[in-house]
Image (tube, rainbow, N blue to C red):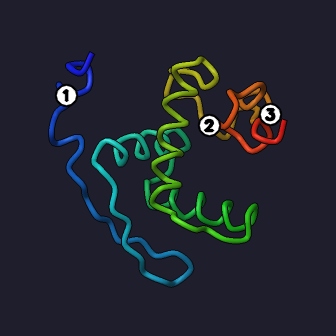
């Protein structure tokens, strides 16, 4: 069982720090390389750079929740959710399909318990 996980390229779990400007404030975000790669794929699907994606996620998170909390953890969870939704067929594997073109309610319908706020409340 463990070979499935330990055979990962060590570069994938090396961390990298990027500086981003969020509303005029420069902040550093440290993530493992694999998370950066997934965020780059998500961003590319909607013709954005990864910094643009991060700014958009930050703004939408603040608008929805009023606060951010641990933003690096949020980004890791976002990357994991994306990969899980692709694996489940909720998001097309064809990366030319923009995320913004998807029906969010359909993608999120009947999410597993604990994977979305709506599922956690039921």
Q: Where is residue 5 in the image (x, y as percent from the top left)?
A: 26, 26
- State the SS at label 2: helix
Q: Where is residue 63 in the image (x, y as percent from the top left)?
A: 74, 66
Kindly identify which residue carries mark 2: 99
Q: Which residue lies furthest to the right in this view?
A: 122
Horizontal side of 70 relative to 66 (left or right) equals left
| Residue drawn at point x = 28 percent, y = 64 percent | 17
| Residue drawn at point x = 33 percent, y = 62 percent | 30
| Residue drawn at point x = 16 percent, y = 42 percent | 11
- State the SS at label 1: helix
Kindly identify which residue carries mark 3: 105
Instruction: State which mark lies toward you, 2 or 3.
Output: 3
Spatial separation of the CA atoms under disc 2 and disc 1: 31 Å
Kindly identify which residue carries mark 1: 6
N-term-proximal mark, 2 vs 1: 1
Q: Where is residue 104 in the image (x, y as percent from the top left)?
A: 75, 36
Pick the quarter of the image with the C terminus.
Answer: top right
């Amino acid at each position: 069982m463990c070979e499935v996980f330990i055979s990962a390229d060590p570069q994938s779990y090396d961390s990298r720090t990027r500086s981003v400007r969020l509303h005029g404030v420069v902040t550093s975000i440290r993530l493992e390389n694999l998370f950066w790669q997934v965020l780059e794929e998500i961003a590319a699907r909607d013709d954005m750079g990864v910094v643009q994606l991060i700014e958009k996620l930050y703004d939408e998170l603040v608008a929805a929740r009023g606060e951010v909390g641990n933003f690096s953890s949020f980004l890791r969870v976002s990357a994991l959710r994306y990969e899980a939704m692709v694996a489940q067929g909720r998001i097309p594997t064809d990366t030319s399909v923009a995320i913004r073109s998807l029906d969010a309610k359909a993608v999120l319908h009947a999410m597993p318990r604990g994977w979305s706020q709506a599922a956690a409340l039921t």
